[in-house]
Amino acid sequence: AFFSWLDYLDELLMGAHPVVADAIAEEVKEKFLQGILQPQLLQMSELDVLQGTAMLTGTVRQIRAPPLLHHLILFLLGAEQHPETPGDTSHPLRTQLIERCNHLSDEISLASLRLFEELLQKPHEHVARSLVLRNLEMRSYLQHNPPVPEERGHPETDPDEDGLDLEEDPYFTDGFPAAGFGMVKKSPLGSAPAGKGQVSEVVRR
């Protein structure tokens, strides 16, 4: 019943006037998110935490109306955009949800990770800025090295190496027959191989 009502509300705000949609989304944030859901999320009972996180994950997954999505994200993550410092708890709900990703209970950890997975899939700039970019903008992760001057000119070659005759190289002829490399004896013209007669003799026979 709750998600049917949420789907109706989401469709209503999708087609409503921007001023009316923003006013309704603000009321949903104050009366439902802050008044009912937030106390349940901050409970210490494991069952209450699981129920509240599962309901919140389904809410994030189903909402598409920009005004309602904007107020929901501000409710979860806060409006702060400055870099975080150790011990910064400017938005207690956000801090609590992040810490539960590494909870002693595996079920609470998985439920919290599913919630942030749904959040990161939403087309809203503040999600990436609040969770990641706000802590990276003031840091220098790119080191600019000075350009290395290129060496001009071609490497000098030893003239003795260029004029070295391959036949004088003692390693060049190793492994070749004693007849020498590239020296093939050609039989004189008109002579036939041993054991074979001339063509005219074969014809006479």
Image (cartoon, helix red, strand yellow):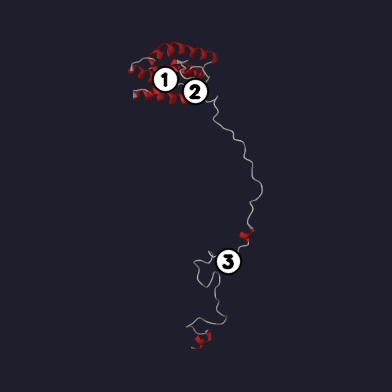
What residue is shown at x 38% (from left), y 14% (from top)?
A: 40
What's the residue type where badge 2 is placed? Val
Q: CA distance from mark 1 to mark 3?
A: 81 Å
Taking depth in this image into account, of 37 and 66 the one nearest to the observer is 37
Q: Quadrant of residue 190?
A: bottom right
What residue is shown at x 49% (from left), y 13% (from top)?
A: 26
- Closer mark to the observer between disc 1 and disc 3: 3
- Name the residue that disc number 1 marks: 97
| Residue 127 appears in the figure | yes
Taking depth in this image into account, of 62 and 190 the one nearest to the observer is 190
Which quarter of the figure is the N terminus placed in? top left
The x and y percentages for residue 51 are 36, 18
Determine whether 95 is above or below 204 in the image.
Answer: above
What's the residue type where badge 1 is placed? Leu
What residue is shown at x 63% (from left), y 57% (from top)?
A: 158
Determine whether 153 is above or below 28 in the image.
Answer: below
Q: What kind of element bears circle 2?
A: helix
Pointer 1 or 3: first along the chain = 1
Label 1 crowd bin: few (<14), some (14–19), many (20+), radius 10 Å: many
Q: What kind of element bears circle 3?
A: helix
- Closer mark to the observer between disc 1 and disc 2: 1
Taking depth in this image into account, of 2 and 87 the one nearest to the observer is 87
Q: CA distance from mark 1 to mark 2?
A: 14 Å
- Residues tagged 1 and 3 counted as in contact (Cβ below 8 A): no
The x and y percentages for residue 18 are 54, 16
The mark total stands at 3
- Name the residue that disc number 2 marks: 127
- Name the residue that disc number 3 marks: 168
